[in-house]
Image (cartoon, coloured by chain):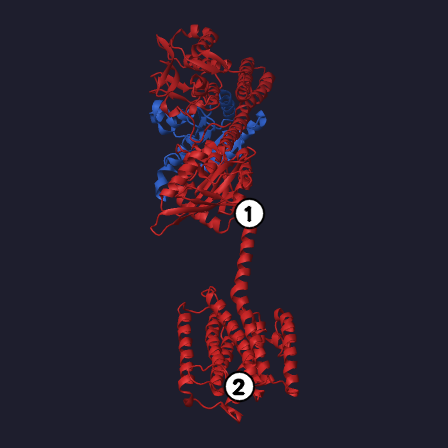
Amino acid sequence: MNGKPINILLVEDDPAHAEIVRRNFETERIANYLKWVIDGQEALDYLQRTGEYETPESSPTPGLILLDLRLPKVDGLEVLSTIKQDSALSMIPVVIMTTSSAESDIARAYKNRANSYVVKPLDLEKFSSLLDAIGFYWLVWNERPNISLWGKYV
Amino acid sequence: MQQIDKHGPLWIHPLYQKPMRIVGGFLAFLLLIVYLTWLTPPQFDAGGVPGYLPLHTLFETFSIVVAMLVFAVGWNSQSHQLAGNVVLLSCTFFAIGLLDFSHTLAYKGMPDFYTPNDAEKQLNFWLSARFLASFILLVVAVRAWNPLRFRTTRYCLMGALTALVITINWLVLFHQDWLPHTFIPGQGLTPLKKFLEYLFIAFNIATAVLLWRKMREPQDFNITHMFAAVCVMAMSEFFFTLYTTMTGGYNVWGHIYKVISYLFIYRAIVVEAIELPYKKLEKTQSDLSLAIHASNTGLWDWDLKTDDIYYSAECKAQLGYAPNDFPNQRDAWETLIHPDDRVGSLKKLADFLNSTATQYLNEHRMRHKDGNYLWIEARGEKQFDRLGHAIRLVGSHVDISEHKRLEEHFRYAIDAAPNAMLMADENGTLVLGNSRTFEMFGYTQEELIGQSISILLPENSRAKHADFMKAWFSRPLRREMGSGLELFARHKLGFEIPVEIGLNPLQSNKGQFVIASVVDISERKMAMARLQEKNAEIERYSYMVSHDLKSPLVTIKAFLGYLKLDIANGDAERIEKDMAFMNQAANKMDQLLSELLEMSRIGRVTSLPVKINWREAVNEALTVNAGAIAKANVEITVDNNDIPLLVDRTRLVQVWQNLIDNAIKFMAEQPSKRIHIGAEKEGNKIVFFICDNGIGIDPRYHEKIFGMFEKLDTKKPGTGLGLALVKRIIQLYHGDIQVRSQGIGHGTCFRFTLPDALQFTNPGGGYERKAYQYPTR
């Protein structure tokens, strides 16, 4: 834990699904800040601090990215590979959260170094417990590297 | 050799067993006479020299005549083909005849022959003749029956023997005292004379033994007669060893046997020199005429100076004519040639006659007397006079109609084949192709036949193919060519045709050929590509359906859960929200399903194409979208040109509808909203377009927008299927759609082509084809 506030970046084109995630994290109080972006381009703008997210204040680096695969403008996989090839971003855990359980998607996601892959459950209860588990695991239990020491160990 | 030994030392070849029984019987009979006369010396005496003289002269004359006949027959026969032994015999018998003549003239009681006749004088002639006869028979028995090496040998031999005879005559007539005595009057024969007679007998016996041994194997000459001749000669000599008086009975028998012996030799020579060659010739002739008859070959002989042509009976019979109702003239032949072949054949003949070639070969049809035409193969050979002028043409006519008929059947059979069939010889020269071949490769028969097969191959595979062909001809088997390889053939216009080729060997009297059956698999390949495309599409479909249809379901289920909680909590505001999310999801799903259905129908359901002007479809689409247009306050202009199309009207309206809808949707908030719709010529294509001054599309997304469920802006209504649908319809007409936009704020242009819808407007029916498409029947 580095003590900084933990942000979650949600990349989700379906407002309904975004609402589900928002409601869940709200009730469980895991995330002190959830940022929702609607397409791949906006996600990249946020992470790379371009376009409307130019200032660091408007785009704090997230501690976890929840990424859908099928996204308008820039596809989820492309967003993933961009993140993982960017040395400043590659350490951020990316959890793919999508409706697709297609083998090809899973394989491509891991090939692009996704940290985890989960399929959105149909049932609300299951969806909630999944989100809880993700939050606990990645934000509580998971130890993340310190970005300032990143270059030292490579 | 062992096998022969098994038959014992006296065994002879079965070929000679029967003639030897006859000859042996005769010899045994003669031997019996010798034996009997030896046991009981004949008391017969011709009554002294004056009485015996005519008898002796008669015998000797007879001998001389036979000796000269032997000479005449042997000398005059075709000596260069004949065994040299015949020449040796004939020449020597000429000398023998001369010596016998001298002997006769020198006989006691005859008028003086240059010098006074006495017993010794005639004996010397006698002995030299006997020596020559027994010696030459021995030589002949030893020497192989080969022809003489040089044609001049016989003249030399003749000269030498003549010289010998002259020498003997000179010696005996003028220098008898130089010679040893053979007869001493009063005492009788000297031992020398008797010894010489025994020596000659020994020669004869040796000869007989040699001949007997030679009879173990078949010989080229009349060996049985030769054998009889030497045996009888030996017996004759034996008599001469017995006599005491010149006129005694032994002397008479001896002369008789001598004549018999000469006759045997004569017989052997006649058979060898005359009968055998004639028999051979006769056999050859009958074989030849049999062959000519059996092969139905007509012969002709054309005198180029007089233009008279001799036609053999066979030649005339071929065409149904009797030997005498077909004139031996050139016209007779010319008029019977098939009119289609006449000019060509006459030209070919004239060219041949004017050329230095000696062999003529042509095939043409000739009219049979019954009106039908026969295929005739004519061959000829030129003959020249001493100055090198062609004077004669000798040749044959063979009826090859049956052959031609089979060839024609073969041609029909391969013509009926659905594939290209072509035949090439060992050098790769094309000799035959069916009509499909010419169609497939774009060549005419005249252009292709006689060319190397390599012109049908892509340049880069020619060298390799030559090697393959060589290897195949070394072991010609029926097989597929290049199985597992992608084979291409080359059309005359240069494009490549994917093919499958089967090879079949064909052996004919003209050599080894290959028949290749070539199947054009472009259709199959294209179908396969289409199928693959379809498969990929189905995959995409199922993936998207599972993903995109699942998404609203997740929403509905999740908010159903929230609804339950919120109802329990009595949170009316939240209940309202939850239900709104669920409603949106359900609506989205409905829209997705109906558009998906529409999408899948494009490929399956097609109405009959109708002929319409392109603007009719645009106007119909504008009518459908009239509400949205009015609402958005967009000004729409349409080009006023006429382009007739043959299309499925509903689909084309759908294209425009979606494009117009799309343009309206992506208008910016601006005072003048404009859309321009038109059609124009671009190169040799006709391009339809729709341009707006709306928000435009970032060039990054130009490809992505045509994908299924692709939406650039999630806030705008729609499912992301509209442009995918448009692209599918355009693809059905083998068209293409592109988007042009400088980027955000610069407006958008969609441009597309519909080649198949324009196809009928070209009277030739040809539109730009893909590389390996060509018309199929």
Q: Callout 2 environment at 10 Å: few (<14), some (14 to 19), or many (20+)? A: many
Position of residue B338 measured from the top left corner of the image (x, y, whole percent)? 48, 34
Q: Mark 2 lies on which chain?
A: B
The answer to whether one can see residue A76 in this image is: yes
Residue at numbered disc 2: B197
Of residues B24 and B739, which is closer to you in this image? B24
Of residues B122 and B405, which is closer to you in this image? B122
In the rendered picture, chain A carries what hue?
Answer: blue
Q: Earlier in the sequence, mark 1 or mark 2?
A: 2
Residue type for callout 1: Ser
Position above or below: B120 against B63: below
The answer to whether one can see residue A91 in this image is: no
Of residues B30 and A27, which is closer to you in this image? B30
Position of residue A75 measured from the top left corner of the image (x, y, whole percent)? 44, 28
Residue at numbered disc 1: B295
Where residue B754 sits, quadrant-wise, is: top left
Position above or below: B212 against B763: below
Q: Which mark is residue B334?
A: none
Position of residue B536 measured from the top left corner of the image (x, y, whole percent)? 51, 30
What element does badge 1 sit on? loop
Residue shown at 51% from the left, 66% from the top: B273
Position of residue B595 measured from the top left corner of the image (x, y, whole percent)? 53, 18
What element does badge 2 sit on? helix
Q: Callout 1 environment at 10 Å: few (<14), some (14 to 19), or many (20+)? A: few
Q: In which quarter of the image is the N terminus of chain B?
A: bottom right
Of residues B202 and A121, which is closer to you in this image? B202
Closest to the camera, between mark 1 and mark 2, is 2
Residue shown at 45% from the left, 49% from the top: B470
Question: What number of labels is visible?
Answer: 2
Q: Which chain carries label 1?
A: B
Tell me which chain appears red. B
Residue type for callout 2: Glu
